[in-house]
Amino acid sequence: MPQDSAPPLLRDAPPTVPSAPHSAPPSDGAPPSRQLYGAAFDWIDAARAERQRAGLVRVLRPRPADSTLLDLASNDYLGLARHPEVTHGAAEAAHRWGAGATGSRLVTGSTELHARLETELAAFCGFEAALVLSSGYAANLAAVTALTAPGALVVSDAGNHASLIDGCRLSRARTHVAPHADPEAVRAALTGHEGRALAVTDSVFSVDGDAAPLPALAAACRTRGAALLVDDAHGLGVLGDGGRGALWAAGLAGDADVVATVTLSKSLGSQGGAVLGPARVIEHLVNTARSFIFDTGLAPAAVGGALAALRLLDREPQRAARAGRIARELYERLTAAGLAAVRPDAAVVSVRAPSPEAAVRWAAECRAAGLAVGCFRPPSVPDGISRLRLTARADLTDGQLDRAVGTIVATAPTG
């Protein structure tokens, strides 16, 4: 999610609304009425009404195990979430190690399986060491907060994911929000700062699917002695040789001043996250990162599934290349049909809609026609442009691709 895009009404403070009428507490010492207790959350009703007026109500939509929808909404880029080897790896790990990790990683939550995944993930992506956490969100919080401190400077891209933004807030460091994908702005923000400094960016931005200029960002950091932290959630499994990630593709993997975070829940079809970097950085996180120290370890089933997916990707690197080809074909066919789409740098394809209401209707009509697509609209997009967000999956057949393109074009808003 882009920088500071949550609406102030929902993020910062509840609106001031009159309390529901109730009687003053009895003077004889009797307990107040239940009506008085209930008034504590009356402000939620006003917040809900505001969401409804703005057309920003979100709802949970539980999916069945055997959904018939063609999926272009999930982040299962390589189609591995249901691959037999991956599900078998998850089931085998659960049978052997149990349903849960049983504790934090520093107590009982580290298994031999966790260590194996960390070793193989670091080697695959070209880094010295790795640390597995319970989610990509937790990994970003761990990396940003442990590598900064009050008095440090963090330069954060304006399009960064919410987890990086929250990491900046929790770090208590001074945060400068730099214009999107602008290395010179990063260089300027770092100029004159004395002490610890860190630039943070997504490798592939989740709204439009555009890639960060990583070599130029690294160069800007190095002129000022700053470290570079890259969230490669949308690059792992798609970019780099055989899907080794955006840092590998940029020639930065394993560099002494570069740290990456990844998620295991996208290309690897499982769940969890990891921080990759120099061994001394990983050791520092083990000792200082609160979202690692005080969180229960990742469940063995997720570890086993991710490890199986990683090995499958290593054995079948063509999956990564196919995901990129599918994305480019989606873009070319949709733009040829007259739709406004953003050229993809990885596996995310963004298709513009004329308004938030049109985007919601478009996504609903696609769903009614059997196609699941993402729908992004303000305030989740800082540019105010609503869009459909499509994910190109490596396992899409030519027939499914034809069906997806046909559905999107046929249901596109007119006028």
Image (cartoon, rainbow, N blue to C red):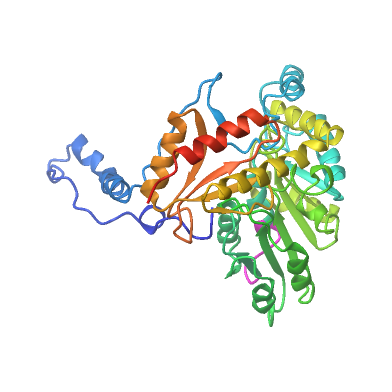
Q: Could you tell me which residue is drawn at 42 percent across and 46 percent down?
A: 359
- Residue 270 relative to residue 378: left or right: right
Q: Nearer the viewer, residue 345 or 117?
A: 345
- Residue 163 seen in the figure: yes
Q: Could you tell me which residue is drawn at 13 percent across and 42 percent down?
A: 26
Above or below, 331 against 398 in this view is below
The region drawn magenta spans 144-152
- Residue 314 relative to residue 63: left or right: right
Q: Nearer the viewer, residue 288 or 112?
A: 112
- Residue 159 relative to residue 251: left or right: left
Q: Could you tell me which residue is drawn at 60 percent across and 33 percent down?
A: 402
Q: Could you tell me which residue is drawn at 45 percent across and 51 percent down?
A: 353
Magenta segment main secondary structure: loop
Which residue is most to the bottom?
192
Q: How many marks?
A: 0
Residue 61 found in image quarter? top left
Above or below, 175 against 324 in this view is below
- Residue 98 relative to residue 354: left or right: right
Q: Nearer the viewer, residue 357 or 96?
A: 357
Instruction: Give residue 40's position: percent from left, percent from top.
Output: 28, 44
Magenta stretch contains residue 147? yes
Instruction: Give residue 43's position: percent from left, percent from top.
Output: 27, 48
Above or below, 152 against 341 in this view is below
Magenta stretch contains residue 379? no
Residue 266 found in image quarter? top right
- Residue 73 seen in the figure: no
Instruction: Give residue 235's position: percent from left, percent from top.
Output: 72, 48
